[in-house]
Image: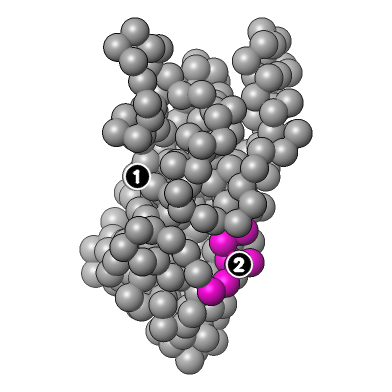
């Protein structure tokens, strides 16, 4: 079994699972969801901020260096080169947002799947229900291990290991920076609980080039002097809706340039 510090469920987690499962009160579920979503945003910012600082140490650059942003945009293959040039000119100080985009895109991949992409690792019988037991800590451990390996594939790990932050052997075990590990677990825990709301909420994605709409998108950053919102350059975090009502807007970075 992969070791990743103390990932045991807290009492508050169990209470949240119980509340969502047992309550038919939409207001109660909405309040619970909003609380977890806020925790996710804060946890992701903490994790990506720390990761960006370590990346800056690795490259010998300041965390707000334009060359760092350029490097990250290319490494993650974000947008065509022509669009990247516009983003570099507009956002030279927001490298952390690129990390947030990357982590979010991986963590919410397969979110609409009731099994969250864990079909191969969840033990089920032929007659079992096609859902996850979100209160099972062993299943959660398999989840964050899977997501860690996806957030940090080998091509990225090869760079990050040089700054002694991310380490992964062939078994998927971790080493070096325990604070980094704890920050990642906090992000994974929030996403895991948000998935438990799956029957109640639906994901609201904003692909690059999507026309900005205030009812569906929340502009995280925009260039100084830009009057209009333009279109979505990158999505920092997906939004959520209940039936046809937007519960949380997508967090996006906007640009006036064509994507």
The x, y position of residue 48, in whole percent, is 55, 64
- Magenta stretch, main secondary structure class: helix
Query: In this orientation, which residue lies closer to the viewer: 131 or 39?
Result: 131
The kind of secondary structure element at disc 1 is loop
Position of residue 42 in the picture relative to residue 80 (left or right): right
Residue at label 2? 178
Figure quadrant of the C terminus: bottom left
* Residue 182 is covered by the magenta coloring: yes
Query: In this orientation, which residue lies closer to the viewer: 212 or 144?
Result: 144
Residue at label 1? 207
Q: Which residue is painted at 50% across and 69% down in the image?
A: 175
Few, some or many residues within 10 Å of mark 1 (<14, 14–19, 20+): some
Query: In this orientation, which residue lies closer to the viewer: 158 or 84?
Result: 158
* Residue 60 is covered by the magenta coloring: no
State which tag comes first along the sequence, 1 or 2.
Answer: 2
Look at the image and give the residue range highlighted in magenta. Answer: 176-184
Q: Quadrant of residue 59?
A: bottom left
The kind of secondary structure element at disc 2 is helix
Few, some or many residues within 10 Å of mark 2 (<14, 14–19, 20+): some
The x, y position of residue 98, in whole percent, is 45, 64
The x, y position of residue 134, in whole percent, is 54, 28
Can residue 38 be seen from the camera position used here? yes
Q: Is residue 57 above or below residue 35?
A: below
Q: Which residue is painted at 23% across and 63% down in the image?
A: 80
Position of residue 196 in the picture relative to residue 34 (left or right): left
Q: As drawn, which residue projects farthest toward the bottom? A: 60
The x, y position of residue 199, in whole percent, is 50, 17
């Amino acid at each position: 079994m992969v070791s990743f510090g103390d990932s045991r469920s807290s009492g508050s987690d169990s209470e949240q699972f119980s509340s969502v499962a047992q309550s038919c009160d939409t207001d109660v579920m909405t309040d619970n969801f909003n609380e977890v979503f806020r925790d996710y945003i804060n946890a992701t910012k903490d994790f990506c901020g720390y990761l960006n600082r370590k990346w800056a140490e690795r490259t010998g650059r300041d965390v707000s260096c334009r060359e760092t942003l350029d490097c990250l945009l290319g490494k993650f293959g974000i947008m065509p080169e022509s669009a990247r040039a516009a983003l570099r000119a507009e956002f030279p100080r927001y490298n952390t947002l690129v990390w947030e985009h990357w982590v979010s895109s991986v963590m919410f991949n397969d979110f609409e799947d009731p099994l969250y992409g864990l079909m191969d690792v969840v033990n089920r019988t032929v007659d079992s229900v096609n859902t996850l037991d979100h209160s099972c800590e062993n299943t959660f451990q398999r989840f964050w291990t899977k997501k860690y390996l996806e957030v940090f594939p080998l091509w990225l790990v090869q760079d990050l290991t040089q700054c002694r932050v991310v380490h992964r052997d062939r078994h998927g075990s971790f080493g070096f920076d325990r604070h980094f590990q704890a920050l990642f677990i906090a992000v994974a825990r929030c996403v895991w609980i948000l998935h438990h709301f799956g029957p109640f909420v639906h994901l609201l994605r904003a692909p690059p080039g999507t026309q900005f709409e205030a009812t569906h998108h929340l502009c995280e950053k925009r260039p100084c002097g830009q009057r209009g919102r333009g279109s979505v350059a990158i999505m920092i975090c997906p939004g959520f809706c209940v039936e046809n009502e937007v519960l949380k807007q997508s967090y996006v970075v906007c640009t006036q340039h064509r994507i």
